[in-house]
Image (cartoon, grey):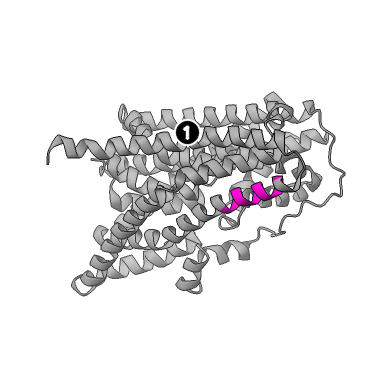
Amino acid sequence: MTTHTHHHPAQARNRQTLYVAIALLLGIVVGEILHLKLADTESLKQFISIFSVLTDIFLRLIKMIISPLVFATLVVGMAKMGDINTVGRIGIKAMLWFFSASITSLLLGMLLVNILQPGSSLHIALPAIGAETGLVKTEPSLSNFTAHIFPTSIVEAMAKNEILQIVVFSMFFGIACASIGELARPTVKLLDSLAHIMLKVTGYVMHYAPVAVFSAMASVITQHGIDILWSYGKFIGEFYLGLVLLCCLLGSVGFLFLGQRVLSLLRHIREPMLLAFGTASSESAYPKLLQQLERFGCDEKVCGLVLPLGYSFNLDGSMMYMTFAVLFIAQAYGIDMPLADQLVMLLVLLFTSKGVAGVPRASLIVIAATLSMFHIPEAGLLLLLGIDQILDMGRSATNVLGNSMAAAVVSRWEKALR
């Protein structure tokens, strides 16, 4: 294989990252122009609905890829690992990393809100205490949590894109394949080719990514204008500062394990991170991220297991946002939360956030449940609804970074990093 053919995909990849970045900026510009020109007219609403349809198409296409991809990669990975001990070992290592990362994110969020006090310096009228937030009420309970983990039907789990349930089924399936051995080989081969086909499909869908990023950005800015950045500037700035600190923290822990290769890892996950940032959805980066991590040299068996688990358990950016938001709203309403309460809240968040992964706007629902538990006015969420998308962009990009670190570090631990 000549260097020339090898060089080309890298160029194409860089170009694609560039397109997404350009689309992001264009979206901001177009959005602001529309916001200024068409303020509060009917055609403004039409533009917004066109934009959201364009973004929606992309997110739907991605969701279409995720189920078969997770199922195929996980089963093939398990079958190749061959025994339940390896699976258990990798799973436990991944969980150790997830829990430490989640606790770190929660604590960092809590620390920053207490130091920076973003809620006490708001110059915005507070929503009335009884105001409706318009969110679906789901109480995080034990039965909800188990219902999220154990599928009644794999077809239903795939139809609803419940990643955790697909993971549970695939684990049983993969371990069974491994223990049957010879008989299962055709199935494993079939699934192996399915995984490659889905990654090829990902390549096709990615051509549409810039459009999605453009329309996602344009829609937010058209609706709220850039001015919203000024009125909430302090809160947004402080939250992003927190995310940057969290990324640095994750990066330096990654450096301890991977050394110089952390930089190469960051180069590889540039595009998935930008994609998650532009569409404000961590899921949209999943298929591309899987591809890039394998290119970076992570073991495909490890990625196949760690990534889907990470997408259910290890959303570092979202974890940090939850503590940030709850304490921000408490501060805005002048409610003082003693340290003991805050620590209880961290524990509550650590577990409730694991149970609602499949719900859209999941973090807002968890926040609403936590607010009502601590008798903080839920209407405070209305303060965040307008800028939720802007915060979500940073959260999603951080989630992608956290999960790729997890996959790389666990690969390293397993001595499986090429």
The prevailing secondary structure element of the residues shown in magenta is helix
Q: Give me the residue at 41% from left, 52% from top.
A: 205
Rate crowding at label 1 as few (under 14), some (14 to 19) or many (20 or more) other CA atoms within 10 Å.
some
Residue 195: x percent and y percent?
Answer: 31, 59
Q: In which image quadrant can residue 344 be found?
A: top right
Mark 1 element type: helix
Q: Give me the residue at 33% from left, 38% from top.
A: 13
Q: Quadrant of the N terminus?
A: top left
Up/down of 179 relative to 10, above or below: below
The residue closer to the viewer here, 376 or 344, is 376
Up/down of 355 relative to 150, above or below: above
- Which span is picked out in magenta? 44-53
**Is residue 51 rendered magenta in the image?**
yes
Inspect the image, locate mark 1, and give the three-letter code of the amino acid beneath it. Ile
Q: Give me the residue at 56% from left, 44% from top.
A: 215
Residue receiving disc 1: 22
The residue closer to the viewer here, 162 or 393, is 393
Residue 212: x percent and y percent?
Answer: 51, 46
Q: Is residue 138 left or right of residue 280?
A: right
Q: Is residue 401 visible?
A: no
**Is residue 295 rendered magenta in the image?**
no
Residue 193: x percent and y percent?
Answer: 26, 62
Up/down of 411 relative to 83, above or below: above
Residue 314: x percent and y percent?
Answer: 49, 46
Q: Is residue 63 visible?
A: yes
